[in-house]
Amino acid sequence: MTPGELLEGPRGRRLCLELARASIAALPEGHPDVERWQYGLFMAPMRLADDASASRVVWYSSDADAASTAPPQPYGPGRPGAVSSAIDAFERVPLPDLTAALLLEALVATVDGARYWQPPEGYDALASLPEARRGLLRFAEVVARSPHAAWWSRDDPAAAQYAVIPDDDSEGDPDGDPNAARGDTVAGPPELHLEDVSSRYAGATMGAWRADRRIVEQRSLRDLEEYPGGGSGEWWSFPPHGVLATTGAIPGFGPVALHLEEDGRGPEGATVVPIGAAAHARICTIRKASDWAALCAAHPLDVSAQMLYDWGETTGRSGAWVMPDWSRVAEHWDGVHLGTSAYLRLAGRAIDCGSDRAGVIAGWSPDTTFWLHDVVGPVGAAERWVRSEPNTHVNVHAWSRGITS
């Protein structure tokens, strides 16, 4: 992936912004620009974010001796422009020594920041400014040269795959998790039967999903008569629940899905199952926008009414929306793979699908393969992975192997 390609999509731009934030945080105390750059990266996103997606409350603290001192006024006279300070940081902050951990930390923050049911976060709005491109390109060039990003472009999802089944301490069937435990409330690790880690029920699941999506579209059309702006609902575009999702592994850090999950639930533990695919498996790999557009054009499912609000909010586009009809895609493919490089370029964009329609790759996580047919299964013993601390902040070293079952 070239530096320019990395900056094509909102997630790629966000990655470069996160590296800039990390570079500012690493500056020594007393650096002449650090306070201004920190101010810019803190205040500019707040000023750029839409009211619907950002809080306007800023908390200040003071010691007892300064209790009567008025808090600083970020928008007052004499304060440097927040956006211009952030842009200056992008262009002049020293570039990072890009370790594997630092790159993964930035990638985790990038995936965590994806929002497809509201306007872009302030950080994403800042990174999308035309004047931010020159500075962010510096970081994109560092990423493009890094050997730690080599795994982003692998396109052989049939090799060394893992299903990650997170522990669940809430009701089964949580939204957005295709591998989540089903059924009654579960405390801790779910009861797992290896033979069930498959897509054996995918056919029946997708048929029911297609019928449901059509019902939702008709209902959404009726609702538009009363609420012309639409309403939020199921905003994701990945295949339905019951279809097995797998990822590869990150060198030195374990399976990708332990670290990178859009709209994730932050489990404290997970069961990891190595998965193998049949040699004859037909895998559709999404590498560029035209690949997604081709899927939507060949197997269209009209979601214009149900996605009017969510995808319109996140992309700023108004018009007809379409996504792949996965039940029809399955007639031609056994799996669909979205690599990390493609994710960074494509996720969250309004992709032109022809005939005045567009689609959005939403809810997909990097390096994910969805298996539409029962062509995969366990090829080894399940492993327990646990976090050494709660998932309240980014720590890519928190996951480690537990007891093997």
Image (cartoon, rainbow, N blue to C red):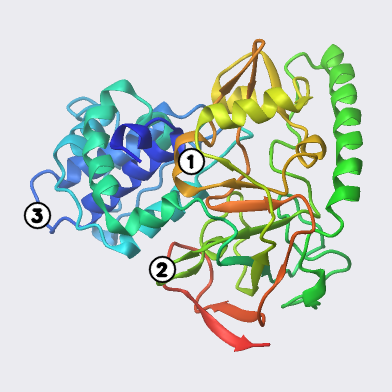
The earlier-in-sequence mark between 3 and 2 is 3
Residue visible at 85% across and 25% down? 217
**How far across and down, in percent of the image, does residue 348 sit?**
54, 33
Whether residue 246 is situated above or below residue 215 in the rendered picture: below
**How far across and down, in percent of the image, does residue 299 sit?**
75, 28
Q: Nearer the viewer, mark 1 or mark 3?
A: 1
**How far across and down, in percent of the image, does residue 339 sit?**
51, 48
- Type of amino acid under label 1: Ala
Residue visible at 19% across and 29% down? 80
User: From the viewer's perspective, is 273 left or right of 367?
Assistant: right
- Type of amino acid under label 3: Gly
**How far across and down, in percent of the image, does residue 305 sit?**
78, 20
Q: Nearer the viewer, mark 3 or mark 2?
A: 2
Q: CA distance from mark 3 to mark 2?
A: 36 Å
- Type of amino acid under label 2: Pro
The earlier-in-sequence mark between 1 and 3 is 3
Q: CA distance from mark 2 to mark 1?
A: 19 Å
Q: Which residue is mark 1?
A: 342
Whether residue 211 is situated above or below residue 353 in the rendered picture: below
Q: Which residue is mark 2?
A: 251
Q: Which residue is mark 3?
A: 30
Q: Where on the picture, by quarter, is residue 304?
A: top right
Residue visible at 72% across and 17% down? 229
Along the line of sight, which residue is nearer the eye, 143 or 23?
A: 143
Q: CA distance from mark 1 to mark 3?
A: 40 Å
The earlier-in-sequence mark between 2 and 1 is 2
Quadrant into which the N terminus falls: top left
Quadrant into which the C terminus falls: bottom right
